[in-house]
Image (cartoon, grey):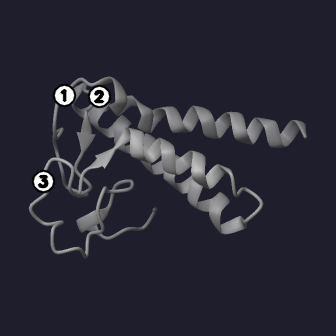
Amino acid sequence: FLGNSDLCYWGLPSISADDPAFPPLGYWRGYVWGPMALLTYWGLQRYDDIPLAKSARTALSSQMSSLVLSQWRSHGRICENFSPHRNATDCTGDRFYHWGALGAFLSLLERESVDREVVI
């Protein structure tokens, strides 16, 4: 997740950047969605014994939190969904939407996961 190209920089878009349907960015095509990121996070968490899955989960959490915070700090918004483009300056979809905050919620889940490892 970290180190993506500028075309698909933030988070986990709903379609691959190399798919022909990606450039037009339809409503469900290409945007980054909090619920999808959360489901992916939980899926990766089930495979924490595999180092690559664990590092992908950590990277997804970090990047999604950074994405949500970038919009919050710049515009005071929690977006319904987000553009995956690095240079995107505004929300896509509604500017205040509850599930947009799930991207930042991943950092709380990640912290809980790390704290649990220290105790165990």
Say which element carries label 3.
Answer: loop
Q: CA distance from mark 1 to mark 2?
A: 6 Å
- In this view, the mark in front (3 or 1): 3
Is 39 drawn above or below residue 13 in the view shown? above
Earlier-in-chain disc, 2 versus 3: 3
Which dot marks residue 26? Answer: 3
Q: Tag 3: Cα neighbours inside 10 Å, few (<14), some, or many (≥20)?
A: few
**In the rendered view of the protein, which quadrant contains the N terminus?**
bottom left
Residue positioned 34% across, 55% down in the render: 10
Residue 27 % position (x, y) = 15, 47
Rounded to the nearest angstrom, the CA distance separating label 3 from label 1 is: 17 Å
Asked whether disc 1 touches disc 2, contact meaning CB atoms under 8 Å apart, the reply is yes
- Residue at label 1? 95
**Most distant residue in the right direction:** 120
Please give left or right for residue 57 compared with residue 26 in the image: right
Dot 2, crowdedness within 10 Å: few (<14), some or many (≥20)? Answer: many
Q: Residue 36 versus residue 66: which sits nearer the camera?
A: 36
| Residue closest to the eye, 116 or 30 | 30
Q: Are marks 2 and 3 in contact (CB under 8 Å)?
A: no
Q: Is 113 on the left-hand or right-hand side of 10?
A: right
Q: Amino acid at mark 1?
A: Arg
**Residue 57's x, y, as percent?**
58, 54
* Figure check: 72 above or below 5: above
Q: Which is more N-terminal, label 2 or label 1?
A: 2
- What's the amino acid at mark 3? Gly
Amino acid tagged 2: Ile
Q: In the rendering, at what x and y percent does residue 97 appear?
A: 27, 25
Residue with the mark numbered 2:
78
Count the marks.
Answer: 3
- Label 2 secondary element: loop
Q: Quadrant of the C terminus?
A: top right
